[in-house]
Amino acid sequence: MIIIMKNSATTQQIAQVVARVERDGFTAHLSQGEERTIIGVIGDDRPIDRSIYELYEGVEKTVPILKKFKLASRDFQPEVSQFRVGGVKIGGKELVIMAGPCAVEGRTKLLEIAHAVKEAGANCLRGGAFKPRTSPYAFQGMGEEGLEILAEAREQTGLPIVTEVMSTEQVPLVAKYADILQIGARNCQNYALLTAVGKSGHPALLKRGMATTIEEWLMSAEYMLAQGNRRVMMCERGIRTFETATRNTADINALAVLKHLTHLPIAFDPSHATGKWEYVLPVARAGVAAGADCLLVEVHQHPAEAWSDGAQSLTPERFHTLVTQTHAVAAAIGRA
Amino acid sequence: MIIIMKNSATTQQIAQVVARVERDGFTAHLSQGEERTIIGVIGDDRPIDRSIYELYEGVEKTVPILKKFKLASRDFQPEVSQFRVGGVKIGGKELVIMAGPCAVEGRTKLLEIAHAVKEAGANCLRGGAFKPRTSPYAFQGMGEEGLEILAEAREQTGLPIVTEVMSTEQVPLVAKYADILQIGARNCQNYALLTAVGKSGHPALLKRGMATTIEEWLMSAEYMLAQGNRRVMMCERGIRTFETATRNTADINALAVLKHLTHLPIAFDPSHATGKWEYVLPVARAGVAAGADCLLVEVHQHPAEAWSDGAQSLTPERFHTLVTQTHAVAAAIGRA
Amino acid sequence: MIIIMKNSATTQQIAQVVARVERDGFTAHLSQGEERTIIGVIGDDRPIDRSIYELYEGVEKTVPILKKFKLASRDFQPEVSQFRVGGVKIGGKELVIMAGPCAVEGRTKLLEIAHAVKEAGANCLRGGAFKPRTSPYAFQGMGEEGLEILAEAREQTGLPIVTEVMSTEQVPLVAKYADILQIGARNCQNYALLTAVGKSGHPALLKRGMATTIEEWLMSAEYMLAQGNRRVMMCERGIRTFETATRNTADINALAVLKHLTHLPIAFDPSHATGKWEYVLPVARAGVAAGADCLLVEVHQHPAEAWSDGAQSLTPERFHTLVTQTHAVAAAIGRA
Amino acid sequence: MIIIMKNSATTQQIAQVVARVERDGFTAHLSQGEERTIIGVIGDDRPIDRSIYELYEGVEKTVPILKKFKLASRDFQPEVSQFRVGGVKIGGKELVIMAGPCAVEGRTKLLEIAHAVKEAGANCLRGGAFKPRTSPYAFQGMGEEGLEILAEAREQTGLPIVTEVMSTEQVPLVAKYADILQIGARNCQNYALLTAVGKSGHPALLKRGMATTIEEWLMSAEYMLAQGNRRVMMCERGIRTFETATRNTADINALAVLKHLTHLPIAFDPSHATGKWEYVLPVARAGVAAGADCLLVEVHQHPAEAWSDGAQSLTPERFHTLVTQTHAVAAAIGRA
């Protein structure tokens, strides 16, 4: 941390801040500029609430130096994390595509779409059994029955399953069936849930919250890593901005920034990031071009009959085009 | 819902949409404009995912007509909801001020600040026993011991207690001690938690999420109301925008909009909405001037020693000034 | 500026940065932390593009220390700037209310509303002769004829005139008629216009851009101040956020922040900040409670017949209520 | 436009709205739902300020049906606009890359970089002679001398020139030298400037404003189109959001949305969209993958010596890599 004093700060005010720095167990390093004095705090001040220094008379502001995340950082581990889920390697050279319906809507339909996405080129099957819905009056998911159906689809197709878990109490149940536990955007900073998923040791896919900064998002991953769970994937799914032409704004920059900051594998969800199937294909290509390791795509055999997210779901045929085109882009940038 | 067709839509495409409307159990009402045909959907289409209509050929977009929230709406209940918590009436003519430290930091300190805020004019005591922190390495709250201390403070001061609950599993425990269950900004769309708090029947204070629209926020309240819990308060605490001069951007408009849309009492938290104690006083006055029924203010006897949120905490003296000035503003606009 | 090195930075990389600091005419001050080296740059580095330092190998990021604005700063001038426009003192203890229609729509109508707002308690008359409209097909204002009508209204009522200027070429013309030149939100960073208004020496009201940070906004004021024009007022009119329930989001915090950072008088426009007349009254009260020196309010004798901004315009009767209530709030916080 | 009545609206209130619709020259079409009455307005109501209808008693809200832009719309012209600038075809199958320094910094340096970007594969030369800077104390560009240098570079390299124009008064001067007039992000809604550039008939590149919606941005293009200027290009350069890890947030979705809505060619500026050279390459690839017709890239022979935007400038070598990789992606998606 650096403490920037006001240009009106007195010697006594500076001394008081230095005294506090030392009381907190750090060393203070003064730097006298032409207009202002700056105090460098030497030591690992991550656990300190730096805002309290701003309460001292004569302090203008404080600036953090150390990144808050440790285990998620490239400093901690320079090479990209890789792990296997079923037969699929996450974080490797090969682009991984997870696809399936927004929600499990019944056994026959789910098995049908599972086979369809597999044929079209998907590596994993997605599908929600517990659904976070804005309205309490909307379909909330099939629950455990949905999980059983997903497990049956895995048996038939060999595709590993990624599905959402919404509360600490559900973790054991969902972990019993799923290969990857998805933490949804609305729960990105649900620390109780992050801790529980961390403790489960189960592979996890962490969606970015609608207004979560990249740093906060990595800190949410850190909650899981700190519990010893190293099989964590980040998933950009669009952020909320002033633009209303699309459901969310795909933060394509975030993919490049994450590659720089973290060793965790990076997924991209062009379905939620756009909200309209017409935009899913070009934006999925963009995600791969920007470096995503994995895509998460909503596919439904009859989008107009989907119980949720129909507007952003691809038909199996369109999904097949997406697989072909994104693999072409992946090849163009040197991926397998 | 209204369905707006493209200007290139054919008669057959219109017929297909009408057929779907009727299949879904509604009546279609066509309106032929100069450039476009519009289809009005007659019936309660709230439970329907209107986006699926956008998948039909020839459809440009759909527009919702009915507000999604029902029980939270002024249409459902025109007069403001009022309820008592301890001896305090929420939603009445009198301004209610809830104050206390960010977190319970120990018995002696909490009892001291409880007496101090009571003397300064507070009506309720706030204080966190379970703390949602961005970092897993930061202080996470005293847990049940913190709740016991809060209960002791209530006994001594008579002030009802408002404190945060972070997961479904904690609801029974926190409800045992607290008068009002606070749902934090990061859990504003944690539907499992909302449902559990709704079922508890306990008075609740629902903070707005950092990027939650007013309508989504009311839908989160609706989750609790739908469980039969009618003692719900909305709390504006600032939203996330591009501006970094303050921790959040106080959405003062939201207070006026809520007054218009809902009968639920409205609280305002100038501490989180600004993040700096210098700004808390003028922004608290603004909240009351805009119509807030209740203020939620962080107060600490020694902000520079606070374990969290020190920078935005008032001393008891400054809090006393806030009480005086906000009561003067309340009187100026005709409140008691 | 402070330069934060990566924890992997080598001695040679540090030496190269120091060499550059010295080549740029500054002194480098090294501070060796446990994990990182920090380089303080001693000297007035405001004119330097600090981002170039981030290009050096081993540099993680740079942090500015000095505020970019000088003449607008409280450091430069601690007391609030005051100036007279006609008989009205801006920046004084008395709340100033500027009111009138969005646009001048004709001589008779403008004279009528001018008298009406004066009677209701306005101190200045607003009205647009040049109108920035999103659509090229919409009414663009009456131009010079509108300015002549405004001047006639001033003669009849004694109210000084505030009206918008949209391009450098219009500055002499508008300055010939207006008492205060308004720079609209869309031109907040139109530096050619700011320079021209600065050179004119005419009192100016600078609206905040829809996504302009407080610091950038003060830098835009600095453009005028740097030309020797000290009669500049800041006007908060709402920023653009994700919330769509209101036209803009009133940044009430900005009023408190500006009071802290600058000596320039502060205006607040509750009409644009909300976009709906129902919300103008409570939000205007909030602006005064937060410390606004001046209000800018749209008033029209028949809002439903207004050529623009009808939805956010008050009738003279409602405006009279606003004057009464905002004066009551002003009195409650110790203003005249 | 559709007018949605409150569920409490009376027959008389509905009649008053209908009367107004008819007075405005339109036909009203009533649709009686279970909870609400809806009034469809038949006719071209684009020039009407629909907000005034919201002032009528019993009206809840209004919803626009017709898109505001006409000439920019795909409805108006289904095929993509193509035009030649020098020997370069804009809007064709071939990816066009415009590159060069942020600002012209002198004759020798500009000529050198012009040859370098040509060799590396650029099709046009960019460089600013008039620079919009946040600070009045920063370098403001070389002015006409800079334009002369750009013209000399064109003579030597054959590359057409794109450069910014900042005010109506500068239009004739800049048009004398430049092949494409750039309108910067801060002037995206400077309607006086848009009109002047429209009248000039000169090819134009319109950058998106930091908080300009896609629809507003197209309306700004419409200002130029309405003056008879059809050689207009849209340029996405990132929008302002809450995320601070990058200078702006590249709105990659906007490229897909624009392709859908407009026939105007689409450019993408990965330099401003990210603000850091490390991110320019992956994000440029993403832009091409999403469908950009053109890239605008900042290149400087010695970024660490650049007078502005050094941090986001590529060296000629890195730019060469960008050309190679973006052409590979273009080929992968079927472009020339």
Image (tube, coloured by chain):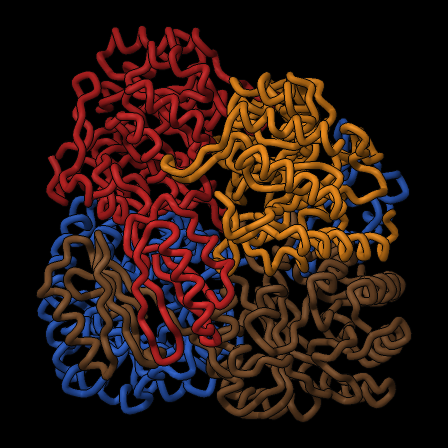
Chain colours: A red, B orange, C brown, D blue
Image quadrant where one finds the N terminus of chain B = top right
Q: Residue A162: where, in percent of width, then height?
A: 32, 21
Q: Residue A163: where, in percent of width, then height?
A: 37, 20
Whether residue C298 can be seen here: yes
Q: Residue A124: where, in percent of width, then height?
A: 26, 21
In the image: residue B98, left or right of residue A227: right
Q: Nearer the viewer, residue D326 or B30?
A: D326
Q: Nearer the viewer, residue D38 or A104?
A: A104
Whether residue D291 can be seen here: no
Question: At 78% across and 45% down in the image, what residue appears?
Answer: D59
Query: Which image quarter: residue C302?
Result: bottom right
In the image: residue A145, left or right of residue C122: left
Query: Which image quarter: residue A22?
Result: bottom left
Question: At 21% across and 29% down in the image, what residue appears?
Answer: A96
Question: At 46% across and 18% down in the image, what residue appears?
Answer: A130
Is residue A321 depicted above or below D4 in this figure?
above
Q: Residue D285: where, in percent of width, then height?
A: 22, 51
